[in-house]
Image (cartoon, rainbow, N blue to C red):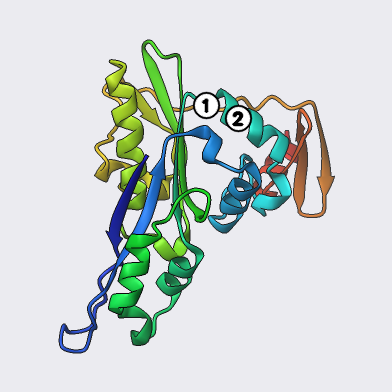
């Protein structure tokens, strides 16, 4: 557990017009007990993420019970907290919100953020056999706090915990849009040329307007019309 200060993203305004940007206090934890599954579910929704291959709305597909099980079986978790007041000020773009008084700074020092008084704003986890390999999943940061290096802190903390156990075969499951971020964290293409493959065998399928509704276990997925056309021609 650690209390750190991060800096808001720099604006494109000239220095003469841009007020000094105050540091933002955050609390980084590696204790699973500090994570409230309901708050984590909310963070998934804010970050537009879900545990679904074809997500539309994160809240619709993410089951809190399964999320709690996933947390329990995750080898390592990292969570980040900040106070709601700081979260609001970080999202405001007016110049008045970019300055800080001595009293505000003193309050941040005397009453630091903790998991008990803070809001969950960042998360990441790793699943590992604790001997040879590990995979990093679900790295996310609330949109108002992106660009401050919080996501990189999360990944670095996970890697540190893994390498302390002499685990260096570490993969990251990410989308194409997330590749630059993980590359900046030191990840690259596998030298063996391996890639991720997903199990896609269906139990049933039916049409729904311009989409093909396919059931994977208890999950109902909607495949784009292009795939529907391909299926009807076969």
Q: Quadrant of residue 57?
A: bottom right
Instruction: Tell me which residue sits at (47%, 58%) in the image.
Output: 142
> Which residue, as the protein is rendered here, is positioned at the far bottom?
17
CB contact under 8 Å: marks 1 and 2: yes
Disc number placed over residue 210 in the picture, else none: none
Lateral position of residue 186 relative to residue 229, left or right: left
Instruction: Tell me which residue sits at (65%, 51%) in the image.
Output: 58
> Which residue, as the protein is rendered here, is positioned at the far front?
110
Label 2: state its secondary structure: helix
Above or below, comparing residue 209 to residue 137 in the picture? below
Above or below, comparing residue 143 to residue 13 in the picture? above
Label 1: state its secondary structure: loop
Q: Quadrant of residue 182?
A: top left
Q: Mark yes or no: residue 18 visible.
A: yes
Quadrant where the N terminus sits is top left
Residue 130: x and y in percent read: 41, 14
Lateral position of residue 208 relative to residue 170, left or right: right
Disc 1 target residue: 74
Q: Residues within 10 Å of mark 2 (few under 14, many from 20)?
A: few
Residue 188: x and y in percent read: 27, 34
The residue closer to the viewer here, 114 or 223, is 114
Q: Give the Cα distance between marks 1 and 2.
A: 6 Å
Q: Residues within 10 Å of mark 1 (few under 14, many from 20)?
A: some
Quadrant where the C terminus sits is top right
Q: Mark yes or no: residue 168 visible.
A: no
Residue 9: x and y in percent read: 29, 67
The number of callouts visible is 2
Disc 2 target residue: 70
The residue closer to the viewer here, 88 or 27, is 27
Above or below, comparing residue 213 to residue 234 in the picture? below
């Amino acid at each position: 557990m650690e209390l750190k200060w991060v800096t808001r993203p720099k604006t494109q305004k000239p220095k003469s017009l841009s007020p000094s940007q105050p540091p933002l206090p955050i609390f980084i934890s590696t204790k699973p007990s500090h994570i409230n599954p309901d708050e984590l579910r909310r963070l998934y929704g804010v970050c537009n993420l879900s545990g679904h291959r074809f997500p539309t709305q994160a809240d619709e597909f993410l089951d809190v019970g399964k999320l709690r099980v996933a947390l329990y079986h995750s080898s390592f978790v990292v969570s980040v907290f900040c106070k709601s007041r700081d979260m609001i000020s970080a999202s405001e773009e007016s110049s008045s919100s970019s300055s800080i008084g001595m009293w505000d700074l003193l309050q941040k020092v005397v009453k630091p953020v903790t998991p008990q008084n803070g809001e969950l704003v960042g998360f990441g986890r790793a699943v590992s056999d604790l001997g040879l390999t590990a995979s990093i999943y679900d790295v996310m940061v609330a949109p108002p706090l992106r660009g401050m290096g919080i996501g990189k802190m999360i990944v670095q903390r996970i890697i540190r915990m893994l390498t302390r156990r002499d685990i260096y075969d570490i993969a990251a499951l990410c989308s194409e849009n997330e590749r630059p971020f993980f590359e900046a964290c030191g990840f690259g293409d596998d030298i063996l040329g391996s890639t991720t493959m997903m199990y896609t065998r269906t139990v049933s399928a039916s049409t729904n307007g311009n989409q093909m509704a396919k059931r994977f276990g208890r999950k109902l997925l909607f495949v784009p019309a292009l795939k529907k056309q391909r299926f009807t021609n076969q």
